[in-house]
Image (cartoon, grey):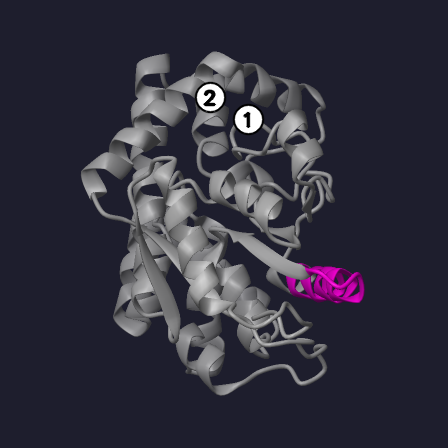
Amino acid sequence: MGPTACGKTRVAVELVQRYPCEIISVDSAMVYRGLDIGSGKPDAATLAKAPHRLIDIRDPAEPYSAADFRADAIREINDVLAKGKIPLLVGGSMLYFKVLRDGLAQMPAAVPEIRQRILDLAEAEGWQAVHARLQEVDPEAALRIHPNDPQRLQRALEVYQISGKSLTTLHLQETDNTMPDLPCTLKFIAMLPTSRADLHEVIAKRFHAMLEQGLVEEVAGLRARGDLNSNLPALRSVGYRQVWEFLDGDTNLTVLADKAIAATRQLAKRQLTWLRSWPNLDALPCTLGVEDVNIMDNHLKSLMLSPFTGSCK
């Protein structure tokens, strides 16, 4: 686990060469086909060296939920265990990790009238006003959900207005017992950058590299399909949302880069907030360099002194 751009994939690929592991991606953007550059998806050479499960499994026109991820991840974990190997779950989608660990809360069904009232508020005062209202009733959810994420904002406030309970409270109180159980115990290890400034520098360099690699052209190709829009979860991903706005003519290239880099920094901040409150977490300092591979390797050796088994430990 770890914030975006901290080097998780690089370390995981190297660990696969040293241990009998198979990688399962925990990334809400990499699941979509065609979202390659902006999601930081490993290239063909890397995937040949270290295959990743749960990437390129969904068309961007088809939303992929946390419930979908949990079911898919448990299936892949079982398959890896059946081969006598260790599932190595790698990514930064903290909600996916939480749902995998805890199961899913049983949420109230949508009420069209309440949903429309929230949409009316957003239309009249903007999504910042919706975010402010959510901050009043569920500050933890407001911290996790960005003011520019209308679907999640709407749902979080809607849940409170329907049930009288915050989304955070429901997640803590209830789980769906119909979901399949984990076949093993999970061990959570986080790569935490030692310098926030260094992480910000890496984020900026990486986004400019994505532009050079053809991110704008990638999004233009997705737009050209004709069946996609900016409200789909795939296109609300950080980077893709800003490029879509650029192609709408709302910004220039400089503003695009500034907005995308700022949004990515905010994403990293939210990921670190999740990790600060994560129970039973093994936190490792990382320097955003190649030496992080050996740091993680040494830590794994201390955790895994016994032979590899189906315990996932």
Badge 2 marks a residue whose secondary structure is helix
Q: Nearer the viewer, residue 38 or 135?
A: 38
Residue 79 on the magenta segment: yes
Question: Residue 9 magenta-drawn?
Answer: no
Alpha carbons under labels 1 and 2: distance apart: 6 Å
Q: Are marks 1 and 2 in contact (CB under 8 Å)?
A: yes
Q: Residue at x 50, y 31 (%)?
A: 240
219 versus 112 height, above or below: above
At x 45%, y 17%, the residue is 211
As rendered, which of 273 and 118 lies closer to the eye?
273
Residue 32 place in picture, x, y as percent: 66, 39
Q: Quadrant of residue 102?
A: bottom right
Q: Is residue 177 above or below residue 22?
A: below
Q: Position of residue 168 (x, y in %)?
A: 41, 75
| 20 relative to 217 in the view: left or right | right
Query: Identity of the amino acid at label 1?
Result: Ile
- Compare marks 1 and 2 and give the one earlier in the sequence: 1
> Magenta part mainly helix, strand or loop?
helix
Image quarter of the N terminus: bottom left
Residue drawn at x 47%, y 51% is 92
The kind of residue tagged 2 is Met
- Residue 210: assigned label: 2
Which residues are the magenta region? Answer: 69-85
Q: Residues within 10 Å of mark 1 (few under 14, many from 20)?
A: many
Residue identifier under label 1 = 37
